[in-house]
Amino acid sequence: LQDLKALLDAPSLDDPSKKISDVIHPSTIEKGKHGDTFDVLYYAFTIYGTWYSQKALADNGWEYPKSLDDMVKLCGEIKKKGIAPWTYAGKYPYYVHFNLFAQIAKIGGMDGWIAIDNLEPNAWTSNDAVKQVVEHYEELAAKKYFLQGSQGLTHIQSQTAWNKGKAVFIPNGSWVENEAAPTTPKDFGMSVGALFDGSAGDKLPNGTLRAEPSEPYIVSAKGKNPAGGMELLRIMLSKKHAQNFATKVKSLTCVVDATEGMTLSPGLASASKAFKDAGDNIISLQLQEWYPSLTDEKIGGLTGQLLTGEMSAADWIKKTQAYADAVANDDSVKKFKREK
């Protein structure tokens, strides 16, 4: 991959007195580094969380829950109405990790999560937040708060079931508005909520959000015109093209404040508001980017069993730690490190 330092140092198209590094979200640089080299530009800026229909909540007099306990109580009310509280992409259970992993970081703090990102020994088993969050999902499964058959659904099928009102909540990222557009009712009011509070003593406050760069763009170092590739990215990082992307794809970009003054679609407006409301309380994770076979295949398989009630929270934690240890001890896997 081409080292993109020259892109970061290049003048912004909108204001040549500013470098590209001055106009993009700082986490874009952290996310795109491998070792000391910035070689991947994550162009989109994704808001992860619990997605829901504002209309569904308003019509039933429900409020978005503040805590994990509040969510469990609301799920009971929803189920009494004959609606499933949750659905998820059971064929790709790592979608649930978008929330589950971030919820651990919210309750237990970023130091605890960075230990997980860094594959440190006992990072999963010694973190009380892991136990609290995984037991929450165990409870949701035990009380049958997931739409029946979710374990067999793709991401598209689960989103369609959600759009049709078969379930109230779905874990996802802000690409969902564009992806689910063909089946979304006009008055759906697509919205995203922040992470939930734990039982007590959370390290991060209510309103904390997982929001981070996504959708990677690269330039080939051995291509015919690496400079031209970087110039294309520089053009994409202008406000004009960031706004065009937001309009066409219903997603924020890494260009800071590019959508100011725009009329946004419901989901994008909700995501933008949640991001602003969170302030500095933003969570960014690396485990799924650095070790996707660990998170998506190994841990994903465990999560699938957890959500169908086939695996206990205790076994999930124990086996997840064992899988993480195996990767940590595998010399064939290149390792990366975050600083606390």
Image: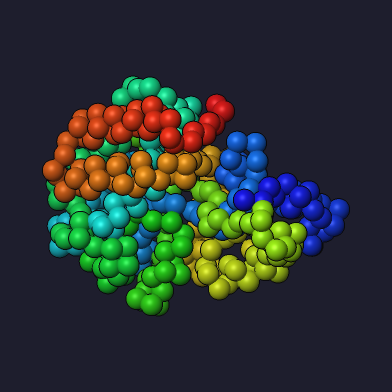
| Position in image of residue 118 (x %, y %) | 46, 30
Residue 218 lies in what quarter of the image? Answer: bottom right
- Compared across the picture, whether 41 is left or right of 87 comes to right
Work out which residue is located at the far right of the displayed protein and give it: 17
> Relative to 5, does residue 149 appear above or below in the rendering?
below
> Relative to 73, does residue 176 appear above or below in the rendering?
below
| Position in image of residue 78 (x %, y %) | 21, 57
> Relative to 5, does residue 215 appear above or below in the rendering?
below
- Compared across the picture, whether 93 is left or right of 269 comes to left
| Position in image of residue 77 (x %, y %) | 20, 53
Along the viewing direction, whichever of 118 and 67 lies nearer the viewer: 118
Determine the residue positioned at 16% across, 39% down.
311
Whether residue 130 is visible here, answered yes or no, is no
Residue 14 lies in what quarter of the image? Answer: bottom right
Determine the residue positioned at 37% across, 74% down.
184
| Position in image of residue 322 (x %, y %) | 29, 29
Determine the residue positioned at 35% across, 67% down.
55
Whether residue 325 is visible here, answered yes or no, is yes
Quadrant location, the C terminus? top right
Total numbered labels: 0
Determine the residue positioned at 43% across, 30% down.
331
Along the viewing direction, whichever of 129 and 231 lies nearer the viewer: 231
> Relative to 280, does residue 8 appear above or below in the rendering?
below
Q: How is the image coloured?
A: rainbow
Along the viewing direction, whichever of 4 and 200 lies nearer the viewer: 4
